Amino acid sequence: MSQSFQTQGEIHSIGETTEYGKNGFTKREFVIKLTGPDENSSYPNYIALELIKDKCALLDSYNIGDEIQVHFNLSGRLWSGGGKGEKCFTSLQAWRIEGVSAGANAGMPDYGNEPAPDYGNLPPAGSAYDDDVPF
């Protein structure tokens, strides 16, 4: 089982979704420049990640230059063939991508021009309405 990680960065490049083989396996590669307080801008770190199968569409709503947070699995496999010895392949397989907002409202939903929902009219906890919940 692979281990799960997350990182934040600016999208540097986005590849096209490519289909491999006859079984319809798809893969999409992208590169981010890592950002954050631990990164030294004089020596930027670029990492290549991949999306596979139904996850390829996760990048459709993002553009080069967008700041994102990526959740990914680190996995690897060995391959030997052609009499050339053993080779190790390492993959960073992304499974979730989130946009990063600047400012104090980071992580809050964006309601655009609509007012935020008003939750002030909910019955207080412990009221008679608590018994009406089906679970």
Image (tube, rainbow, N blue to C red):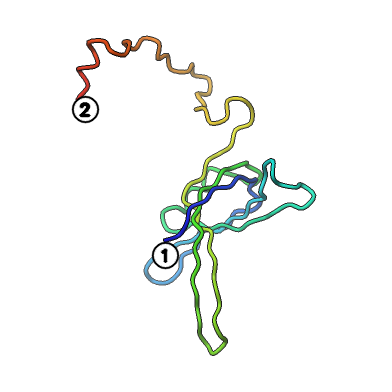
Picture mark count: 2
Give the residue at mark 1: 25
Horizontal and vertical percent position of residue 33 = 67, 50
Amino acid marked by disc 1 = Phe
The numbered disc on residue 35 is none
Quarter residue 104 falls in: top right
Quarter of the image with the N terminus in it: bottom left
Outermost right residue: 42
Question: Residue at position x 41%, y 54% from top?
Answer: 54
Circle 1 sits in a helix, a strand or a loop, which is it?
Answer: strand
Question: Residue at position x 60%, y 58% from top?
Answer: 48
Relative to 18, 46 lies left or right? right
Horizontal and vertical percent position of residue 56 = 47, 54
Relative to 83, 10 lies left or right? right
Amino acid marked by disc 2 = Phe
Mark 1, other Cα within 10 Å: few <14 / some 14–19 / many ≥20: few
Circle 2 sits in a helix, a strand or a loop, which is it?
Answer: loop
Horizontal and vertical percent position of residue 22 = 39, 71
**Can you say whether 40 is above or below 119 in the image?**
below
Report the Cα–Cα distance between label 1 and label 2.
41 Å
Give the number of the mark in front: 1 or 2. Answer: 2
Quarter residue 127 falls in: top left
Foreground residue among 56 and 67: 67
Foreground residue among 112 and 78: 78
Quarter of the image with the C terminus in it: top left
**Can you say whether 71 is above or below 111 in the image?**
below
Question: Residue at position x 63%, y 56% from top?
Answer: 47
Whichever of callouts 1 and 2 sits on the residue coming sooner in the sequence is: 1
Question: Residue at position x 58%, y 47% from top?
Answer: 7
**Can you say whether 59 is above or below 18 in the image?**
above
The numbered disc on residue 135 is 2
Mark 2, other Cα within 10 Å: few <14 / some 14–19 / many ≥20: few
